[in-house]
Image: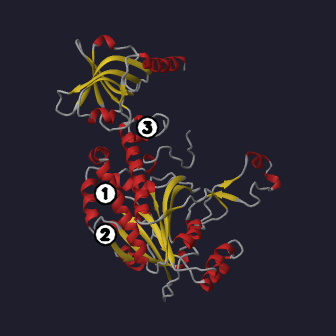
Amino acid sequence: MLGARGGWRALRRCASLPRAVRLRVREALGAREPADAVRVQGWVRSVRSQKEVLFLHINDGSSLESLQVVADPSLEKRDLTFGSAVEVQGKLVKSPHRMQNMELQAETIHVSFPLKMKERHPLEYVRQFPHLRCRNNTLGALLRIRSEATAGIHSFFQDNGYVHIHTPIITSNDCEGAGELFQIETSREAKESAEKTHFFNVPAFLTVSGQLHLEVMAGAFTHVFTFGPTFRAENSQSRRHLAEFYMVEAELSFTENLQDIMQVMEDLFKTVTSTVLSKCPCDVELFHKYIAPAQKGRLEQILKHKFMIISYSEAVEILKQAPQTFTFKPEWGCDLQTEHEKYLVKHCGEVPVFVVNYPYDLKPFYMRDNEDGPQHTVAAVDLLVPGVGELCGGSLREERLPFLESRLQRLGLTDAYQWYLDLRKFGSVPHGGFGMGFERYLQYILGVDNIKDVIPFPRFSHSCLL
């Protein structure tokens, strides 16, 4: 620790050196004119020492490309290694190298934090070092893409007149009805659990969805959305599941057609993806070159064409006629498993597919009854994408009070959801909405195999590092 502190003191002393303009690496690479006094701070990506010249490449996370530093060999220090945090001061000049615009001719190099880690490691390995893995090029590119995608999602909804709602993380509702919730209790309650007291006077949980709170707000603002963390206590370590992940959710009032919901899903996907491709070309290229070589072409084709639509009943028939044997036998009335979802996407030409009108008994109480027969369905939709399976899920909501009262009564939930019934009594309108898993979205557009590698600090069963 003393060495690190001493290094940072050296950084602060740089303020007494001749006045220099501080530039990010991205700014230095994009500069149009040379500059005499420049300082750049970052981490060393490579060191190459020759008899007459020392070459460094440094990066500060602002760009996938690193800045080349050219220095006199006398400036080389023993702790100047891969991963070291440095501040370099000198002149920004035109680079004779064809592949980059500018380079920095160093006059001083201060090493503030040495780190000795040169080897290239697979994503599975660096995942166990969440405090260091962000310095990896792949994770750095991922986090810049994640940042742009987040901004793109907010821009899409704001440009289309949606109001952003901060829905609560702590809730007394179980939106999905699956019972896979994290219950909240204070440390004192945990020790005195026999007393059965609650900080909130009622059992409280980490949210699995902001949907029900959005429905409250949709009664006043017509179009609303939220984007935040959600939690599922699934004892799963699969490549598709996390215990903590981010969800994009929207609710639309005065919506009577499932097609309207599907159109917003498709527009959101295409708009945000186009934004990411245009704003992060180098970062995306890293994934499409080294992680998923064919993904770029597939994405470009998907953005040009409408997504396909099939009914749940059609999906089951396709699965029954499939030449392969599934672990879970497809039957009408059973939920679609990941193996089924991936086959359906493959059968439809490796393009996103909307599956609509699911069995009534498969879905939560709030989904609108289609009043059809003999196979009873609700107005629900899932968006399936290649390699991932389900990306989005949505439905029309049951706005008719008698239908909702009847179903809640059968489920024994009338008292718990009296407030939800009140929404139907006082000015309810036809409405619907959907949710999209943000990490699964990133998985798909980048071609990343494991969802744990598209989030900064993955939480899953038996793992909560940091």
Q: Earlier in the sequence, mark 3 or mark 2?
A: 3
Q: Which quadrant would residue 352 be assigned to in this image? A: bottom left
Rendered location of residue 36, percent (x, y): 28, 22
Q: Would you say residue 144 is visible in this rendering?
A: yes
Rendered location of residue 59, percent (x, y): 35, 31
Q: Give the label on residue 274, or none.
A: 1
Q: Gap between marks 1 and 2, in whole Å? A: 26 Å
* Towards the viewer: 107 or 464: 107
* Towards the viewer: 428 or 377: 428
Q: Which residue is at a point 48% across and 21% down the rendered structure image? A: 8
Pointer 3 with pointer 2, Cβ within 8 A: no
Rendered location of residue 417, percent (x, y): 67, 73
What crowding class fits label 2: few (fewer than 14 Cα within 10 Å), some (14-19), or many (20 or more)?
few
Q: Earlier in the sequence, mark 1 or mark 2?
A: 1
In the image, what residue type sits under mark 2?
Answer: His
Q: Would you say residue 334 is visible in this rendering?
A: no
Quick check: 359 above or below 327?
below
